[in-house]
Image: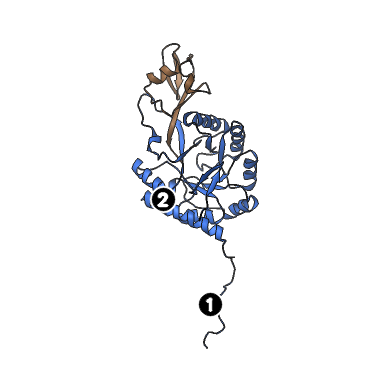
Amino acid sequence: MSDTFTLAGKEFRSRLIIGTGKYRSFDEMKSAHRACGAEMVTVAVNRVPLDRKTESFLDHLDSAMQILPNTAGCFDADHAVRTARLAREALETDWIKLEVIGDKVTLLPDNEQTLEAAKVLVKEGFIVLPYFTDDLIMAKKLLDAGCPAVMPLAAPIGSGMGVQNPSNLRIMREQLPDATIIVDAGVGVPSDAAVAMELGADAILMNTAIAESQNPEQMATAMKLAVEAGRLAYLAGRMPKRLYASASSPIQGAIK
Amino acid sequence: MRVQINGELRDVPEGISLQTLLEHLSLSQQRVAVELDRHIVRRADWTATNINEDAKIEIVHFVGGG
């Protein structure tokens, strides 16, 4: 079945976008990346350490993968905009995962600053993929600002708690049937990824769930399958939930 | 003269260009970007851009992240 996923005019076969943080080694990261089948990978922008040669982190990524720089670590719109511009200059890509964090403890997004940064970056020609709280009205504002997709969280970054508010995702899917919704952050296990996809997410971005597992390559494979399973289930359409049983076998005709 | 590079105060030769500064710091120049006093300096302009006293310079590259 051909079920590709198009983002800002680019077609992807995989609905999994993968991070590059927290891996115990480059080899572990590379094998996980291969196993999960992702075609896009996100990297962070950071100050170069002075007075020593550092090898380029990017050399450890499969050259076929699209690199999506992110603005992780930014706490206001101004820093996020500057970081995005630096990323574009260094990588010659207009793509940016916009992340403006509001608080160091929860790492929850600052939606207001995110919207402000998104407006500036869209005007400058960036393809802005914003991470934000799973809120329909905010999603609408980000789409109106010209973001080609929105990236609501499932749960706080690195928490592994899974989809904390399935109703919000359902509402977002139903009210924004044409929008591209990528669940970003909070997935812990494959069933979380499957749930997000069953609720109608178009794709999932994850990092810690794979990187912090005991065997990232195996977990990456499990996540790939879960994303595919969830997607297929969404397309197939789930059975209705009922409070009472509904017999699968005929009741009449059973021997007495 | 004194400048600030990635938050660290450094003494560098008077009127040094960005290009020379990067060589001076022995940084890899592949896939890095430079901001001088909050404005990006394109790679093509590194040689022609001289740094003034008290300049604030940010040099970034890419690291693992999610």
| Chain for disc number 1 | A
In depth, the one of A19 and A50 nearer the eye is: A19
Please tell me whether residue B3 is drawn above or below residue A95 in the rendered image.
above
Q: Which residue is mark 1?
A: A249
| Chain for disc number 2 | A
Q: Which residue is mark 2?
A: A220
Residue A91 in sight in this render: yes
Q: Earlier in the sequence, mark 2 or mark 1?
A: 2
**x, y percentage for residue A82?**
53, 29
Please tell me whether residue B61 is drawn above or below residue A139 in the rendered image.
above
Residue at coordinates 47% horizontally, 23% vertically from top-left?
Answer: B43
Amino acid under disc 1: Ser
Spot the blue chain and give its letter. A
Residue at coordinates 35% horizontally, 40% vertically from top-left?
Answer: A26
**x, y percentage for residue A31?**
36, 46
> Badges 2 and 1: C-beta atoms under 8 Å apart?
no
**x, y percentage for residue A32?**
39, 47
Residue A212 in sight in this render: no
- Image quadrant in which you'd find residue B18: top left
Q: Residue furthest top?
A: B14
Label 1 crowd (10 A; few <14 / some 14-19 / many >=20): few
Q: Secondary structure at mark 2?
A: helix
Amino acid under disc 2: Ala
Residue at coordinates 51% horizontally, 31% vertically from top-left?
Answer: A88
Spot the brown chain and give its letter. B
Kindly report the distance in space between the C-alpha atoms of the residues bearing marks 2 and 1: 39 Å
Q: Is residue B21 left or right of residue A248?
A: left
